[in-house]
Amino acid sequence: MKWNKYTLKTTTEAIDYISGLMIELGIDGIQIEDNVPLSEEDKKAMFIDYLPTLPKDDGTAYISFYTEEDNDDEALLHKVREKLKEASLFINVGEGTIEKDITEDIDWVNNWKQFFKAFTVGEFYIKPTWEEMKDHAGKLVRKIREKYKKQGWILKYIYRLAIGSRGGRHIHILINREANEKMATDLIITDLWEQQWGHGHVNFRTLYSEGGYRQLAVYITKPLEKWESELKRYHPSRNLIRKDPETEEIKRRSLVDRDGKSRPPKAPKGYYVDPESIETGKNPVTGYAYRHYTLVKIKKKE
């Protein structure tokens, strides 16, 4: 759910008075921001886990309040401005300007997570679940690399951490499969998973070098969901080859035939066009037509 956030710029001198005015106008909750340092009495009366270093107090303060997105707030804002005008006759209300912003519940739910890190309380080590997820994935990749190294294999991977809408956590890994008479990638991962966690399960799908995995690439690199704000989109190994795609400017007449029907793209010798990758359209800025597609190199038979 989205909310309207109104922020009033005032002075520390007027905070208490203006807060009282807002309560009279039916505004239930307010948020106050200022740089006034806490007194020794305040510190004793409050539990303070971490006291940040604040800029020098210049007497400026901000009071914010929230309303539902669909509310017509003009009447309420008019009353607030009228009350400020009256108050300015006997108290310094400062600029008295009001700025509007839009915020969402998801911000309140997730934004605090970036400040919550692992810490120790006596003999106990407290770590948030999303940090554990990152650690588990990193540990799994390191163990796989160690197993590969013993076999003389080079590890290449891309992995993505994901959280379902109901909170279920899982890992997607694209990895180069290796095997010999005694060992194989799927056996390594299964054994490591059972050793580390002992619950959940591992699913494997074999991908072949002929290509045709555009949808898979889109999924791995898709934007994070709102509830995944503490994660990174994907994690590639450093030894992957990163090539910029080759582009060629084409004229519109090469996209369609004389009857206006779309022409299929022609692949150069030694390649074929991935049919799932063909995408045509019109650039909304330039007005020119475009066509995107992926060429897959054909492996020579040995």
Image (cartoon, grey):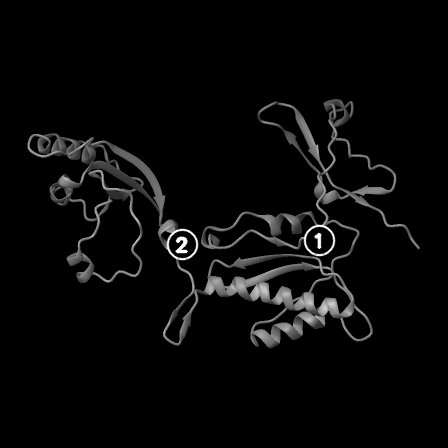
Give the residue drawn at x 26%, y 42%.
Answer: 56
Image coordinates of residue 115 in percent, x first then y, are 39, 55
Image position of 160 with respect to 96: above or below:
below
Q: Which mark is residue 110?
A: 2
- In this view, the residue in front, 70 or 244, is 244
| Quadrant position of residue 26 | top left
Q: Is residue 47 found left or right of 2 in the rendered image?
A: left
Q: In this view, does 44 lie to the left or right of 217?
A: left
Residue in front for this viewpoint, 264 or 298: 298
Closer to the chain start, of discs 2 and 1, is 2
Q: What residue type is labelled 1?
A: Asn
**Which residue is tagged 1?**
239
As drawn, the label of residue 100 is none
Q: Which amino acid does label 2 sit on?
A: Asn
Dot 2, crowdedness within 10 Å: few (<14), some or many (≥20)? some
Q: In the displayed structure, does residue 207 sit left or right of residue 299?
A: left
Secondary element under disc 2, as helix, strand or loop, is: helix
Q: Residue at the spot x=40%, y=74% of the render?
A: 124
Q: Quadrant of the C terminus?
A: bottom right
Q: How much space separates mark 2 and mark 1, taking CA atoms?
A: 33 Å
Image quadrant in which you'd find residue 91: top left
Q: Where is residue 185 in the image (x, y as percent from the top left)?
A: 73, 68
Q: Where does the image place residue 139, in percent across and percent down from the top left? A: 59, 67
Residue at the (75%, 30%) spot, across then down: 248
